[in-house]
Amino acid sequence: MTMMPSIGILGGGQLGKMLIHAAKKIDQSMQVAIYDASLDACAREESDSFTFGSFDDEKLLQHFAQTVDIVTYEFENISPDVVATLPNAIQGSKALKVLQNRILEKEFINSLPGIKSIPYTVVEKNFRYSFPFIVKTTTLGYDGKGQHIIRDDEDLRHVHLHMVAETYLENLKEYSMIIARNKNGELTHYPTFENVHVNQILDTTNFANIDKNLEEQMFHKAKEIAQALDYYGVLTVEFFYADNQLYVNEVAPRVHNSGHITLNAANVSQFDLHIYSLIGMEYPQIEVDKSWCMVNVLGQHYNAIKKSSIPGIFYDYRKNSTQYNRKVGHINGLLKNREQLKEVRDR
């Protein structure tokens, strides 16, 4: 019997936790280690071993990598230079280097033939831009952090040098294309997901009802991005569609919040696909049930969900705190019950 490789995950949040579940589903004997800068990391309790340390501690990270066969990461804010020194970090470091910085990310996207970002500029002295627009910090902005919609002169107080200013697209549709790529050159992908954000935080996800041509465009662009980044594993490309134009909003070199729907709506989840990619397993034919949806649960929703009966499956990340606007879980349920799920959540 072939011995399954051991896996080390840099990051112990909910994505790491669900990657552990996927690895154990493939083979209960597969050893999964977690490295995190927080002793309260929610994936710790389900890992086979846990290393506590800074993500800037190059020596400790290298030692951690030597204890496992394969290293992966579940979030982007890790030094690409350190990851480049880890020969068993299969995802590679190029994606981190490019995607940690919004300016580098947009320059990269626009360098690829037929792919474009949302129109943008970098805030410099004597900056002027037509209202409305949105500003974002160059680094570390996620889940609405470091982002502000600028509608009038009063909002300009949120604009600072070196931020990215993007055109604010009205009446847009937000989609994500989740693909997987392995060292054998194989690729697979899910049908396109449609996402709704509230305050720049993902609120709900369902399967998009779009024509085949638009879906093929998104897959082609996502494939080109993965190949240009020399990336292996699950990769998520967020698209904005407005005025018959398709823009790349962001690229995430990891499993993604919008892919949580696949835990119930597909025969193979995004977490399964990521593990398959890392260990070289053949991808199964993906089958989906488009009647499902996903509803995010934030800190302010937690108590209502815990006290209520819901027509769905609540995935509790069991985080050590339930801060406002912090993701603490999600619900997978039927699309026909989405508004009911949101109503219960928002009580």
Image (cartoon, grey):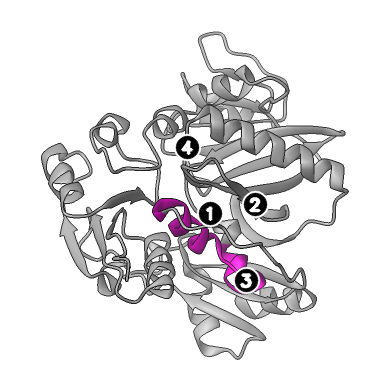
The C terminus, quarter of image: bottom right
> Which of the two marks, 1 or 2, is nearer to us in this view?
2
Q: CA distance from mark 4 to mark 3?
A: 24 Å
Range drawn in magenta: 260-279
Q: Which amino acid is tagged 3?
A: Asn
Relative to 38, say whether 89 is above or below.
Answer: above
Category of crowding for the residue at label 3, using alpha-carbon neighbours closer than 10 angstroms: few (below 14), some (14–19), many (at least 20): some
The residue shown at (57%, 70%) is 263
Q: Which residue is mark 2?
A: 189
Q: CA distance from mark 1 to mark 4?
A: 15 Å
> Which of the two marks, 3 or 1, is nearer to us in this view?
3
Residue 150 seen in this snapshot: no
Q: Secondary structure at mark 2?
A: strand
Secondary structure mainly formed by the magenta segment: helix
Q: Which residue is mark 1?
A: 256
Relative to 86, say whether 188 is above or below.
Answer: below
In contact (CB < 8 Å): disc 4 and disc 3: no
The residue shown at (64%, 43%) is 238
Q: Which amino acid is tagged 4?
A: Tyr
The residue shown at (28%, 36%) is 83
Relative to 27, say whether 218 is above or below.
Answer: above
Of residues 204 and 111, the one nearer the viewer is 111
Q: Does the magenta run of residues contain 77? A: no
Q: Which amino acid is tagged 2?
A: His
Q: Which residue is mark 3?
A: 267
